[in-house]
Image: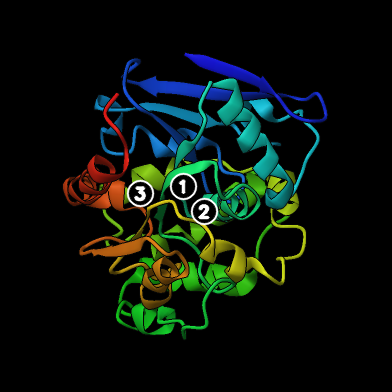
């Protein structure tokens, strides 16, 4: 199913609607930045219990022709999506760069988030915890795929359009998974990116009072890290939970940046336990 709502500028913004039609609604924000949300699937079966509303962010998928905007501005799109679904407050599940949008929404609309699940969020702009990415990368230096990914990172992105940028992201993808096995490779090959959407999404200045704003967010917040995530790291990610008064966190062993792909049972066990406490039954 699909859902369409209108942005403040009149743009038609599209969302996929998956899962259990009569279940509690989760708004699911893809990362990338500006990756097509198909890579999320149904988050290891969350759709069995919940209705998943997955927006195509500006510049992406069926919202590709909309005017572009930063994540700070797209927070208003999320709020308008919430209202269009008839929700007083919403539960957000966000992955990677999508957590930047979830954080922006929480900062601008602190009373409209009922709960948040932040999966492998980038943390460098939020907490002053030294990155452990170098140590995680060093532990895998004997892997040819990791060496190739590091070389691609060193060379820098190919900015000659969406296909070239997507191909470069694939060359770097091994760093995002704990094991570069057939499951990881298949998942990585399915990802698609909007270069213009990513540039716009990442634009804009972080508010100087962001931490103070997040300290006022009373919504239960669950931060999920991958214990072998050589992309976002582990210690800084777990520290993000401390920014929220009701924050908690977990590190999924045997997982990198995509825990619902790499360790689906452990991911579901952790997220189900949190949501069962934080989200009223449908």
Q: Vertically, is 243 above or below 135?
A: above
Which residue does the image show at 35% across and 78% down from the upper left? 136
CA–CA distance in space, label 3 to label 2: 24 Å
Frontmost of labels 1 and 3 is 1
Tell me the quarter of the picture where residue 235 sits: bottom left
Kind of element beneath mark 1: strand
Q: Vertically, is 237 above or below 280?
A: below
Which residue does the image show at 38% across and 59% down from the upper left? 257
Residue closest to the eye, 237 or 230: 237
Read off the residue under disc 2: 99
Residue 94: give its label.
1
Give yes or no for contact between labels 3 and 2 (Cβ–Cβ under 8 Å): no
CA–CA distance in space, label 2 to label 1: 5 Å
Q: Residues within 10 Å of mark 1 (few under 14, many from 20)?
A: many
Report x, y in % for residue 8.
78, 30
Give yes or no for contact between labels 2 and 1 (Cβ–Cβ under 8 Å): yes
Report x, y in % for residue 216.
54, 61
The answer to whether 8 appears left or right of 193 in the picture is: right
Is residue 75 in view from this perspective? yes
């Amino acid at each position: 199913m699909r859902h369409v709502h209108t942005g403040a500028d009149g743009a038609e913004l599209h969302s996929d609607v998956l899962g259990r039609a009569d279940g509690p609604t989760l708004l699911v924000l893809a990362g990338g930045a500006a990756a097509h949300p198909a890579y999320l699937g149904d988050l290891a079966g969350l759709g069995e219990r919940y209705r998943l509303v997955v927006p195509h962010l500006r510049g992406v998928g069926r919202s590709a022709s909309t005017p572009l905007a930063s994540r700070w501005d797209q927070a208003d799109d999320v709020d308008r999506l919430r209202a269009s679904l008839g929700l007083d407050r919403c539960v957000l599940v966000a992955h990677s760069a999508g957590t930047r949008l979830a954080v922006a929404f929480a900062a601008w609309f602190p009373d409209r988030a009922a709960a948040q699940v932040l999966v492998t969020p980038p943390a460098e702009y939020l907490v002053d915890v030294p990155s452990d990415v170098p140590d995680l990368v060093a532990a895998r230096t004997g892997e040819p795929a990791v060496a190739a990914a590091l070389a691609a990172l060193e060379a820098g992105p190919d900015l000659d359009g969406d296909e070239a940028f997507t191909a470069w992201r694939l060359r770097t993808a091994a760093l995002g998974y704990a094991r570069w096995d057939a499951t990881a490779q298949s998942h990585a090959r399915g990802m698609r990116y909007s270069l213009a959407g990513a540039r716009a999404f990442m634009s804009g200045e972080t508010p100087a009072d962001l931490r103070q704003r997040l300290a006022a967010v009373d919504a239960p917040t669950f931060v999920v890290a991958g214990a072998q995530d050589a992309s976002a790291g582990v210690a800084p990610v777990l520290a993000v939970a401390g920014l929220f008064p009701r924050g908690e966190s977990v590190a999924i062993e045997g997982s990198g940046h995509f825990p619902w792909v790499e360790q689906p049972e452990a991911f579901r066990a952790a997220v189900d336990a949190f949501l069962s406490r934080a989200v009223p039954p449908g």
